[in-house]
Image (spheres, rainbow, N blue to C red):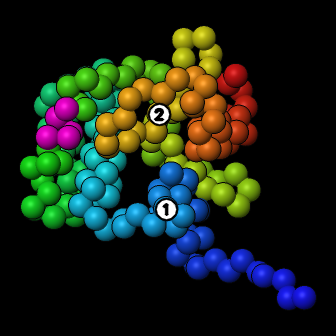
Amino acid sequence: MTQAITVYRRSELEAISDGCLHRYRSIWIDGVDDTSDEALLGQGFHKIKHCYVERLVDGNLTQDAEEAEAAFVEGAALSLMPARLLPGLRELWRFHAEKFEMDPTRLVTAETKGAEGQVGWTPDLVQTTHDGGLEIVDDKSGWHPPMTEEELKNLFQARVYSRFARDRFPHFH
């Protein structure tokens, strides 16, 4: 009897090592087109958010409209966003930036690729909590109702990030 062997494409393995397991699953398992307008908007959003977090930390700011606008310009340029998508990206970013606040003294890392064993992961934002724990933020550019604690426990990506965080940041609980 012949045994089937799973064959992985190089680009599939690279997607895993890039560190976003949600993106890997979406593209390689669910068959989502990562060149779609929605995917490009999500990628642009992440670039902008990273630029904004860096600006907030550099200025020791919790929130700033001028820095949010400067981060939009910088992140949109870095993401090579097609001009036709800029109005939608701006609307998405403004919606997020108006509500987003962070304490720059709590930042552990943002968009930093890590590897635990053979799997990479890139959390959008990792911050300390007031009780000495970690908060891992994984932004989604689409809207979804907040998940319950039970739903999060069953979410593959949340479980993996939690496991990798315990290995990468062992001095937190």
Tell me which secondary structure the magenta stretch mostly adopts.
helix
Q: Amino acid at mark 1?
A: Asp
Q: Residue 158: x percent and y percent? A: 59, 38
Towards the viewer: 20 or 63:
20
As for residue 94 lying within the magenta part, the answer is yes
Q: Nearer the viewer, residue 43 or 156?
A: 156
Q: Residue at x 54, y 11 (%)?
A: 130
Image height check: is 130 above or below 37? above
Q: Mark 2 is on which residue type?
A: Val
Alpha-carbon span between mark 1 and mark 2: 23 Å
Does residue 18 belong to the magenta stretch?
Answer: no
Can residue 160 be seen from the camera position used here? yes
Q: Residue furthest bottom?
A: 2
Residue numbers of the magenta segment: 91-95
The answer to whether residue 27 is above or below residue 70 is below
The mark found on residue 98 in the picture is none
Residue 108 seen in the current view: no
Label 1 crowd (10 A; few <14 / some 14-19 / many >=20): few
Image quarter in which the C terminus is found: top right
- Whether residue 160 sits left or right of residue 69 in the image: it is right
Q: Position of residue 146 (x, y in %)?
A: 42, 26
Which numbered marker is on residue 137? 2
For this view, does 171 lie left or right of residue 72? right
Q: Is residue 99 above or below residue 8?
A: above
**Residue 30 badge:** 1
Q: In the image, which is nearer the foreground, mark 1 or mark 2? A: 1
Q: Are marks 1 and 2 in contact (CB under 8 Å)?
A: no
Q: Secondary structure at mark 1?
A: loop
